[in-house]
């Protein structure tokens, strides 16, 4: 219950704090844009994007206190110890992510769900590759530290292993169903809560949740099992970064068939089947090395 309470406080602080500070931030940007030309571009930022940036800021600011409350005292506890096989761990993760996307992408192409689309300029391709690389590295690091190094790692100390695996992966899956909201006509003190309510509408859309929720939950289990069996968070970071990069790249260079298939991959049942098969492989695969079990004690030096 201690872990659940800490996580609940974190979520309330992140979402509540972002909702309250976003209108103030938006107003300051408007005022700054009117006074100084340097801020004119920032003043044109849509309110919903300001809310998203505030969410990210609060999530990052509260991450360290959350990890400490979960008993994660330093990078060794996270699985980021000095790793003599760092490149091997990252490389293995990159191959895993590429294999998952390559398999599901091949099925998508074979079934006619998507087809190639190379009608992009060199500038568009360069911009995509740059953005995909940055997104892969950033998203993978933050989400793996939070969901695998933090939540899963903490839950497995006080819970049954499978319970920690399932619950942490379900939480990871749920955060991917926020919808893009519409901006309010007037920004008031409570407009941030209005935006958050719109973002949460995706949780009530059954067609959007299934099978995508199952697919992402099983993917979260794969990443957690990879973390557990490799004894290092670097492997799951590499896998996650590879998944983000190659998924974005595949959707960039392909197009879907409107009215027949979604533009996504995770909401297709064959993607769920691929993830499930890989998950069973990790469940049955012998562990390479034991994850470091760290009791709740005072800080120790970060050494392997």
Image (spheres, rainbow, N blue to C red):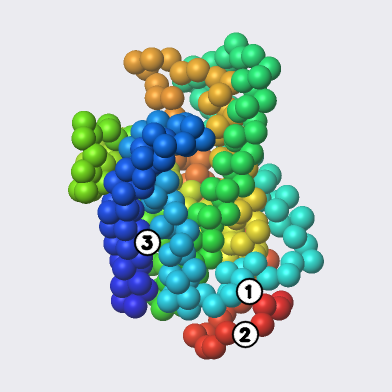
* Circle 2 residues within 10 Å: few <14, some 14–19, many ≥20: few
Residue 118, horizontal then vertical, whole percent: 62, 14
Tell me the CA gap for discs 1 and 2: 9 Å
Tell me the CA gap for discs 3 and 2: 29 Å
Which tag, 1 or 3, sits closer to the chain's start? 1
Look at the picture and state if 236 lies above or below 71: above
24 on left or right of 124: left
SS class, disc 2? loop
Residue beneath the point at 40% across and 31% down: 44
Residue beneath the point at 38% across and 15% down: 258
Residue beneath the point at 39% across and 51% down: 55
Look at the picture and state if 167 lies above or below 244: below
193 on left or right of 303: left
Q: Is residue 169 visible?
A: no
Circle 2 residue:
300
Farthest residue to the right: give it. Answer: 84
- Circles 1 and 2: CB distance less than 8 Å? yes
Instruction: Say which of marks 1 and 2 sits in front.
Output: 2
SS class, disc 3? helix
Which tag, 3 or 2, sits closer to the chain's start? 3
Look at the picture and state if 11 lies above or below 187: below
- Numbered circle sitting on residue 275: none
- Numbered circle sitting on residue 167: 3
SS class, disc 1? helix
Instruction: Say which of marks 3 and 2 sits in front.
Output: 2
Circle 1 residue:
76
């Amino acid at each position: 219950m201690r872990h659940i309470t800490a996580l609940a406080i974190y979520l309330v602080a992140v979402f509540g704090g972002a909702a309250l500070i976003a209108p103030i931030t938006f107003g300051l940007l408007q005022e700054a844009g009117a006074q100084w030309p340097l801020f004119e571009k920032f003043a044109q930022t849509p309110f919903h994007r300001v809310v998203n940036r505030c969410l990210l800021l609060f999530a990052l600011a509260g991450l360290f206190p959350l990890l400490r409350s979960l008993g994660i005292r330093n990078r060794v506890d996270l699985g980021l110890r000095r790793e003599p096989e760092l490149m091997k761990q990252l490389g293995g993760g990159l191959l895993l992510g590429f294999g998952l996307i390559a398999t599901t992408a091949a099925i998508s192409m074979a079934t006619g769900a998507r087809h190639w689309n190379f009608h992009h300029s060199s500038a568009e391709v360069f911009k995509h590759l740059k953005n995909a690389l940055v997104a892969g590295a950033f998203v993978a690091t933050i989400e793996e530290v939070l969901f695998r190094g933090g939540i899963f790692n903490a839950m497995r100390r006080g819970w049954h292993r499978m319970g920690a695996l399932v619950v942490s992966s379900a939480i990871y899956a749920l955060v991917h169903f926020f919808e893009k909201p519409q901006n309010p006509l007037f920004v008031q003190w409570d407009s941030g809560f209005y935006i958050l309510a719109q973002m949460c509408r995706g949780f009530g859309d059954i067609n959007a949740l299934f099978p995508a929720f199952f697919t992402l939950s099983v993917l979260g289990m794969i990443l957690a099992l990879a973390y557990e069996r490799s004894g290092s968070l670097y492997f799951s970071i590499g896998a996650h970064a590879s998944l983000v990069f190659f998924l974005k790249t595949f959707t960039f260079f392909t197009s879907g068939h409107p009215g027949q298939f979604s533009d996504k991959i995770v909401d297709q049942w064959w993607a769920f089947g691929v993830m499930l098969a890989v998950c069973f492989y990790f469940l049955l695969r012998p562990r390479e090395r034991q994850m470091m079990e760290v009791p709740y004690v005072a800080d120790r030096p970060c050494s392997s």
